[in-house]
Image (cartoon, rainbow, N blue to C red):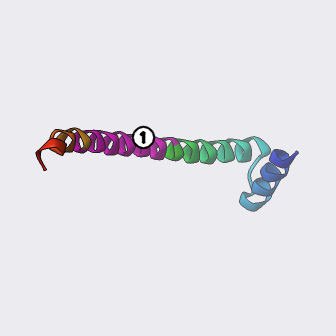
Amino acid sequence: MELHVSIKAAQERWGISYKDAAHRLYLQKMAQVQAEMAEVERLKAMMARCRRLINETVRRHSGQAGST
């Protein structure tokens, strides 16, 4: 029901058919979802880089523990 209300509001706002309003809203939502998915992928890559850096740092310093 909420979707229908959104489509009707878009239809009235833009003065277009119900079908065209639904299609525009669909395209907007898909663009939003794609942007969110791209952000998730960027965050995953950043987390992987952080994990690698932490692991490398731990490995580097674990070899020095006995030398102090």
Where residue 63 sits: x, y (%)? 16, 38
- Nearer to me, 13 or 49: 49
Which is nearer the eye, 36 or 60? 60
In magenta, the rendered stretch is 37-57
Report how many numbered discs are placed on residues in the image.
Answer: 1
Percent across and percent down for residue 11 are 77, 53
Inspect the image, locate mark 1, and give the three-letter code of the amino acid beneath it: Lys
Q: Mark 1: which secondary structure?
A: helix
The image quadrant that residue 10 belongs to is bottom right
**Residue at x 46% of width, y 47% of height:** 39
Q: Quadrant of the N terminus?
A: top right
Mark 1, residue position = 44
Q: Position of residue 60 (x, y in %)?
A: 17, 41
Q: Residue at x 43, y 46 (%)?
A: 43
Dividing the picture into quadrants, the one containing residue 15 is bottom right
Residue 7 lies, with reference to residue 48, above or below; the image says: below
